[in-house]
Image (spheres, rainbow, N blue to C red):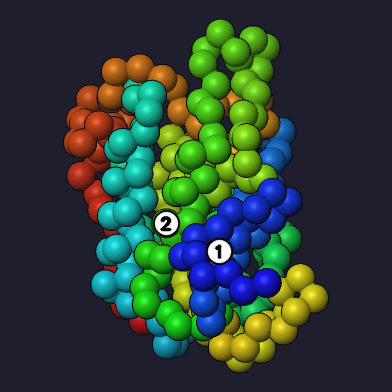
């Protein structure tokens, strides 16, 4: 059967089907884990990607588009968030995303990093226009997600998703996930659930602090910036806790 719709969601798998092109998201973004928080020091050691000179896997324009879109989504959550943190670009996360994207493996990884970082994946085959076509598919999961209100979180918050997956969206709006780094890589041949995709555009976004913890809501509901961590000093920007920092990027390699 040939489908000509721009977007199509099916239960069991979440994917788009486009005429002469296809896009997929892996059903689980960050694997759902029980809370056993890792420290920033642990993350820094684990992201030991060699600082060698190399071709960048994402352009400055794409980087800005991805970051701005994440913050736009985070600022507009409903119900409003009391502790939503402004997201900044993290070069260490971007380098780890590059290292994984170039493996052309349709799965989360590498396994030793998954306990430290969150990860969203998307893939596209066929006519490619913009990285935003891929990242917006994560946001569209919002239509299937119901925010767990405080009275539902006793003793723990339920995962309320009426679709096949909502965890790409919840990772995007996880309040304490205030750093992101992404990479885009074109894979000549890539195995996607038993099928070979040619010239597949592969997007990997890594997040810290890791989100999608079992029994927790993505954020605290309340007046914007009314429950910001003390480190923000009470500064609020566009409904988000804001430190004034936009990126930890020191240099381009």
| Residue 120, above or below 196 | above
Q: Is residue 158 above or below residue 2?
A: above
Do we see residue 98 in this rendering? Answer: no
Helix, strand or loop at label 2? It is helix
For label 1, the residue is 16
Residue at 65 percent of width and 53 percent of height: 10
Q: Earlier in the sequence, mark 1 or mark 2?
A: 1
Q: Classify residue 234 as left or right of residue 25.
A: left
Q: Residues within 10 Å of mark 1 (few under 14, many from 20)?
A: some
Residue at (40% x, 44% y) in the render: 178
Label 2 crowd bin: few (<14), some (14–19), many (20+), radius 10 Å: some
Q: Quadrant of the C terminus?
A: bottom left
Q: Which mark, by number, is residue 47? A: none
The part of the image, by quadrant, that contains residue 96 is bottom right
Question: x, y (%) of residue 202?
Answer: 54, 74
| Picture quadrant of residue 247 | bottom left
Residue at 55 percent across and 38 percent down: it is 144
Is there a contact, CB below 8 Å, between mark 1 and mark 2?
A: no
> Observer-nearest residue: 150 or 44?
150
In this orientation, which residue lies closer to the viewer: 198 or 87? Answer: 198
- Is 72 situated above or below 75? below
What SS does tag 1 mark?
A: strand
Would residue 18 be visible to someone looking at this image? yes
Rounded to the nearest whole Å, what is the CA distance between mark 1 and mark 2? 11 Å
Q: Is residue 18 left or right of residue 198?
A: left
Which image quarter holds the N terminus? bottom right
Residue at x 28% of width, y 64% of height:
64
Residue 99 horizontal/vertical position (percent): 57, 75
Is residue 174 shown above or below 122?
above
Residue furthest to the front: 1
| Nearer the camera: disc 1 or disc 2 | 1
Residue located beneath label 2 in the image:
136
């Amino acid at each position: 059967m040939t489908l000509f719709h721009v977007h199509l969601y099916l239960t069991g798998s979440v994917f788009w089907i486009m005429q002469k092109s296809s896009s997929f998201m892996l059903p689980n973004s960050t694997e759902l884990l029980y809370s056993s928080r890792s420290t920033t020091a642990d993350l820094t050691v684990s992201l030991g990607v060699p600082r060698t000179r190399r071709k960048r896997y994402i352009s400055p324009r794409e980087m800005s588009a991805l970051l701005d879109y994440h913050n736009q989504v985070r600022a507009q959550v409903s119900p409003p968030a009391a502790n939503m943190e402004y997201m900044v670009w993290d070069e260490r996360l971007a380098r780890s995303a590059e290292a994984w994207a170039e493996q052309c493996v349709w799965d989360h990884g590498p396994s030793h990093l998954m306990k430290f970082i969150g990860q969203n994946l998307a893939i596209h085959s066929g006519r490619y226009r913009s990285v935003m076509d891929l990242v917006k598919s994560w946001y569209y999961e919002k239509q299937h997600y119901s925010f767990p209100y405080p009275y539902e979180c006793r003793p723990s918050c339920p995962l309320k998703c009426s679709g096949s997956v909502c965890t790409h969206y919840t990772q995007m709006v996880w309040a304490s996930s205030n750093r992101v780094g992404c990479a885009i890589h074109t894979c000549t041949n890539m195995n996607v659930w038993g099928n070979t995709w040619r010239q597949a555009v592969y997007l990997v976004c890594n997040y810290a602090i890791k989100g999608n913890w079992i029994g927790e809501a993505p954020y605290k509901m309340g007046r914007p910036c009314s429950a910001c961590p003390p480190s923000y000093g009470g500064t609020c920007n566009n409904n988000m806790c804001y430190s004034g920092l936009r990126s930890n990027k020191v240099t381009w390699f």
